[in-house]
Amino acid sequence: MVLRIRRVLAVSWLCMLAATAQASPLPSVYLEDLTSREVASAVAAGMTTVIVPIGGTEQSGPAIVLGKHNRRAHILAARIAERLGDALVAPVIAYVPEGSIEPPAEHMRFAGTVSITPSTFEQLLESTARSLRAHGFREIVFIGDHGGYQENLRQVARQLNAAWAATPVRVLACSEYYNAAAHEYPRWLAQQGYSNAQIGSHAGLADAALSLAIDPSAVRGDILHQQEPGVAEGVHGDARAATAALGAPGIELIIDRSVAAIRKAALRP
């Protein structure tokens, strides 16, 4: 009898949360901007998809801030969630593998970069996913703005999906997000007449244009438009022609591809 009463109370509580969520739209899609009650209400109402944006704290030459990837992932994750209509966004993971610390290698050769080991990074991803699962989220989506750890995202997703195969919870490493930014958008720029030397692979035209379209304050325009490209300062490309207008189509491409991939994954058994 007591157990039955508890079940009735639990169902009533969930119904109340769902009704509250439907009656009062959430003030934000960002978990960190919500209260615990608001998150519980949203999940009870069926908002069970959560996007985990992953950035990185790394050098991007003299004209783009160290938090470039974090800002892009943070803002784009929200736009993707809003387009989906039933998703929330976890805090950005800003600590990722960026190269050996001692001796300094890759991005760690430049001041301000912060690096962690791949194993630590994968443990961070796993703990994040497990935390979100514990709160009722059923579709956990990793989107990574940086190329160096894409396989780590896929590896963690594979491991968790295998462990949770008998449950309704799934983890998606949304490779389409990064592919759109790093491959499709540069191809579009080439079609507009820009050379590969301009487009570049890091802190070049593509990188700077995307950053300008997302957050102009992340780019030092006075330096960007007069700097000579040079790998000595961590620049691979020529960003002098970059504008926010040039980056806007790339932003839309990233959002479109990511939304389509997440919706497709949700249809899988």
Image (tube, helix red, strand yellow):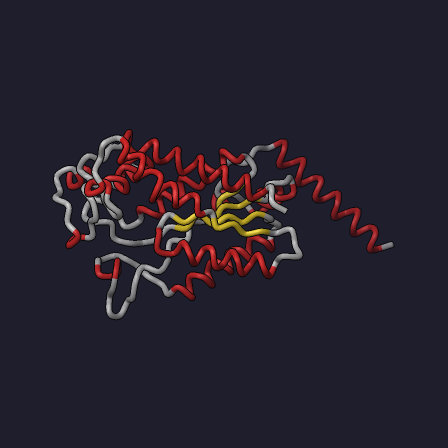
Out of 157 and 222, give the one closest to the viewer. Answer: 157
Q: Position of residue 247 (x, y in %)?
A: 30, 34
* Residue at horizontal 17 percent and vertical 37 percent from the top: 240
Which image quarter holds the N terminus? bottom right
- Which residue sits furthest bottom? 102
The reply, left or right, for residue 115 in relation to residue 60 is right
* Residue at horizontal 49 percent and vertical 59 percent from the top: 156
Q: Where is residue 250 in the image (x, y as percent from the top left)?
A: 34, 35
Relative to 15, residue 10 above or below: below
Occupied quadrant, residue 105: bottom left
Q: Where is residue 239 in the image (x, y as percent from the top left)?
A: 20, 40
Relative to 75, residue 117 above or below: below
Out of 239 and 269, give the one closest to the viewer. Answer: 269
* Residue at horizontal 60 percent and vertical 61 percent from the top: 163
The reply, left or right, for residue 58 in relation to residue 81 is left
* Residue at horizontal 19 percent and vertical 34 percent from the top: 241
The reply, left or right, for residue 100 in relation to residue 61 is right
